[in-house]
Image (cartoon, grey):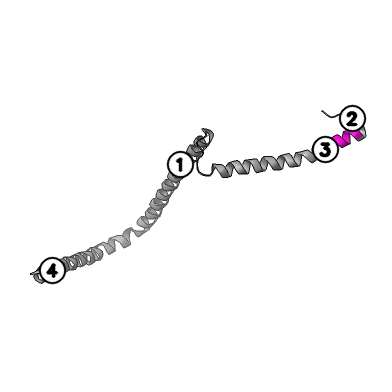
Amino acid sequence: MRFLTAATIGGILLGLSGLTLTGTVVALIIATPVLVLFSPILIPAGIVLFLVTAGFLFAGGCGVVALAALLWIYNYVAGRHPPGSDQLDYARMTIANKARDAKEPVKEGETQVQQETGVQGS
């Protein structure tokens, strides 16, 4: 009984796939002259459609990224510590320390020049 059911369903599906293949080949035979005649219009139109779609997707992606960045900044300013905020704090402190380390020798040199020349700076 199972074999007969499987064979019947398989035969029906095989027949439907054959009809689908036949219909596809007939449609291709009928559509080929139309596609050849209109290809100077269809190909540039397809390229333009692709570029417009890609542009809209890119613009939407940029909008999503900008929104995510603004949300991250809002969470950071609000003190909620979003992912990566520890690295940002570490980088900020490192830059501040380097700036302070670079400023101290300049101040010392300025003080030394003032002492040697006797002129007070502002």
Marks 2 & 4, CB-CB < 8 Å contact: no
Q: Label 1 to label 2, Cα distance in Å?
A: 57 Å
Placement of the C terminus among the 4 image quadrants? top right
Q: Position of residue 73 (x, y in %)?
A: 52, 37
Q: Nearer the viewer, residue 30 or 61?
A: 61
Q: Quadrant of residue 109?
A: top right
Amino acid beneath label 4: Ala
**Separation of residues labelled 2 and 4 (CA atoms):** 105 Å
Nearer the N terminus, badge 3 or badge 2? 3
Is 84 covered by the magenta stretch? no
Mark identifier at residue 6: 4
Question: Residue 6's x, y, as percent?
Answer: 13, 69
As drawn, is 1 to the left or to the right of 94? Answer: left
Q: Earlier in the sequence, mark 4 or mark 1?
A: 4
Q: Mark 1 sits on what residue?
A: 63
Q: Position of residue 67 (x, y in %)?
A: 46, 39
Judged left or right of residue 30, residue 100 is right
> Which residue reaches farthest right?
117
Q: Nearer the viewer, mark 3 or mark 2?
A: 3
Q: Residues within 10 Å of mark 2 (few under 14, many from 20)?
A: few
Which of the numbered marks, if any, corresponds to residue 119? 2
Kindly report which numbered mark, 1 or 2, lies closer to the viewer in this rendering. 2
Task: Indicate which disc residue 108 carries.
Answer: 3
Q: Quadrant of residue 97?
A: top right
Q: Which residues are magenta?
A: 110-115
Residue at the image position 39 percent from the left and 49 percent from the top:
53
Element assignment for label 1: helix
Disc 1 residue type (three-letter): Gly
Q: Earlier in the sequence, mark 4 or mark 3?
A: 4
